[in-house]
Amino acid sequence: MFPESTKSYSYEECKATADWLLAQGPVRPQVGIVCGSGLGGLAEMLKDQLVINYSDIPNFPQSTVHGHAGKLVFGTLKGKPCVCMQGRFHLYEGYPIQKITMPIRVFKLLGVETVLLTNAAGGLNQDYNVGDMMVIKDHINIPGFAGNNPLVGRNDERFGVRFPCVSDAYDRDLQELALEVADELGFSFMQKGVYCVLGGPSFETIAECRMLRTLGADAVGMSTAHEVIVARHCGLRVFALSLITNKSVMDYDSEKKANHEEVLETAELRAAQLEKLIANMVSRIETGNNNTQ
Ligand SMILES: O=P(O)(O)O[C@H]1O[C@H](CO)[C@@H](O)[C@H]1O
Ligand code: HPA
């Protein structure tokens, strides 16, 4: 028996949620998009929208963070059927890790093949500037080191195997596609690096930032890696992008203080460009395979 605290939504519960959503009449989505803090404008790009509030969706958690609207938006982007989470869930909201990642399994059961995740993150790499976009090539899952991994608990083979490989979590072709598209758009602020997830909600201390940088992380945030693990477990193709919304404070003489307002302000400044990048990527992503595991 697994303890109650590790209880995930069951396959049947995820399926019931997916079936309920499909009964609302959307076209089965092939691409799933998760919007980071202040990046919910991505969902506005979808045509022929069907918008459903999280509060109306059976089994769905609720958004509690400013900059995360709490709506699931179905529609087409450059002709491809998509579903977009306008608002994601974070550990610090108090949900068990298995619950914050549940929508990814619902995506899978809706028919999604590829997920594109975005987030706001602090730049640990001192060569990064505020406003840079970092294509994530790998992650460091700090809560996972302490056993807080979304796959803890009973494994349901209908989703995936007990011990999934995540050394190839971030699809290389999608990383290349993002950089190619960014180049075509004339974006001169692209980076590629390692994202580190922490539990939050407190931002990092100076000593922690220095430690994370020494460990090889380029950016730090409080999301995404858990979703990526669950997405890979159920065979989804994954792309993730961090918007560097602030520079991590690494120096005891600095007067700078991380804050959520700056995160949202930077997100607003870069939102239109990020939307263009994602839209152009979606138009060029191969879909209709559903055999990506
Ligand atoms: O990762 P997203 O959802 O973009 O949000 C980021 O922004 C918030 C901090 O400002 C944290 O939740 C951090 O994870
Ligand atoms: O500096 C940060 N730290 C953690 N999460 C974040 N999300 C945006 N910026 C940050």
Image (cartoon, rainbow, N blue to C red):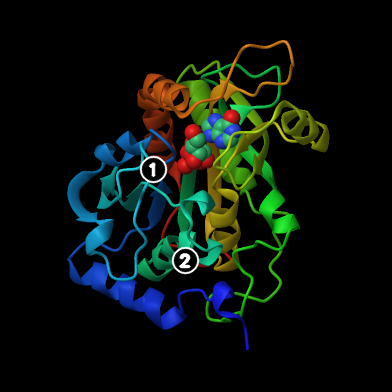
For this view, does 245 lie left or right of residue 57?
A: right
Q: Nearer the viewer, residue 229 or 141?
A: 141
Percent across and percent down for residue 141 are 69, 50
Q: Is residue 119 visible?
A: no
Q: Secondary structure at mark 2?
A: loop
In this rendering, which labeled residue sits more in front, label 1 or label 2? 1
Q: Nearer the viewer, residue 19 or 248?
A: 248
Q: Nearer the viewer, residue 143 or 231?
A: 143
Q: Secondary structure at mark 1?
A: loop
Percent across and percent down for residue 100 are 47, 59
Check the image and report above or below for 94 versus 67: below
Q: In which quadrant of this rendering is ligand 2 seen?
A: top right
Give the position of the C terminus as an image quadrant: bottom right
Identify the residue at image location x=47%, y=26%: 263
Check the image and report above or below for 164 versus 251: below
Q: Quadrant of residue 250?
A: top right
Give the position of the N terminus as an image quadrant: bottom right
Three-letter code, disc 1: Val
Q: Quadrant of residue 40?
A: top left
Q: Nearer the viewer, residue 251 or 99?
A: 251
Q: Is residue 124 visible?
A: yes
Q: List the residue tagged with mark 1.
A: 65
Identify the residue at image location x=68%, y=68%: 164
For this view, does 251 lie left or right of residue 17?
A: right
Q: Quadrant of residue 242?
A: top right
Ligand 1 has an atom within 8 Å of the beta carbon of the residue at disc 1: yes
Query: Rounded to the nearest whole Å, what is the CA distance between mark 1 and mark 2?
Result: 33 Å
Q: List the residue tagged with mark 2.
A: 290
Number of other residues with Cα within 10 Å of mark 2, as a class: few under 14, some 14 to 19, many 20 or more? some
Three-letter code, disc 2: Asn
